[in-house]
Image: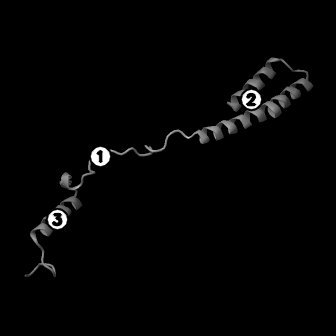
Amino acid sequence: MAGQGAAGQGTNQAAQAAQLQNVLNGGYSVNPSANPYMGQTTNVGQNQYAGQNPYLGQMVNQAQQNIVDSYNKNTSPALAAQFASNGAFGGSAYNDAMQQSQNTLA
C-alpha cells in the first residue's frame, strides 16, 4: 500500500483529487451538474418581498418640504432685502442671483 493515505484512497477520491488538481491548474472542467446553482442569475439588490414603502416616501417629502419652506422664509427674502437696500431690486443682477439661488435649491 505504498503511496496511499492512512485510510486508503478509493477511486472516487482519486477522481475528485484529479478534478481538484485540474481546477487549481487553471482548468475549469468541473461537472456543472454537481452544482445546481451554477449558471443561475440572482436579483442582487432587489427584494421581491418588499413593495413600495409609503412611510419612506412621506419622510422624503417632509424633508424636501422643510428645505423649500426654509428657502422661502429665509434665503429668498434675505436676498431680496439685500438687493432692495442697495437699490438694485428688480434689476438683472437681482434676477440672476434669484435664479442661481433657485437652481441651487433644486
Q: Amino acid at mark 1?
A: Gln
**Furthest residue to the top?**
91
Secondary-structure class at tag 1: loop
Give me the residue at 43% from left, 43% from top: 48
Tag 1: Cα neighbours inside 10 Å, few (<14), some, or many (≥20)?
A: few
Tag 3: Cα neighbours inside 10 Å, few (<14), some, or many (≥20)?
A: few
Give me the residue at 61% from left, 41% from top: 55
The quarter of the picture where residue 69 lies is top right
Q: Nearer the viewer, residue 51 or 42?
A: 51
The reply to whether discs 1 and 3 touch (Cβ–Cβ < 8 Å) is: no
Q: Which residue is mark 3?
A: 16
Judge left or right: residue 90 versus residue 53: right
Q: Which label number is shown at residue 101? A: 2
**Residue 28 on image: x %, y %:** 21, 54
The reply to whether discs 2 and 3 touch (Cβ–Cβ < 8 Å) is: no
**Residue 5 on image: x %, y %:** 15, 79
Give me the residue at 49% from left, 40% from top: 51
Q: Which residue is mark 1?
A: 40
**Cα distance, mark 1 to mark 3?**
24 Å
Q: Earlier in the sequence, mark 1 or mark 3?
A: 3
Give me the residue at 88% from left, 27% from top: 81
Q: Earlier in the sequence, mark 1 or mark 2?
A: 1
Secondary-structure class at tag 3: helix
Q: Is residue 88 above or below residue 26?
A: above
Question: What's the image's color scheme?
Answer: one colour
Quadrant where the N terminus lies? bottom left
**Cα distance, mark 1 to mark 2?**
50 Å
Quadrant where the C terminus lies? top right
Judge left or right: residue 62 versus residue 41: right
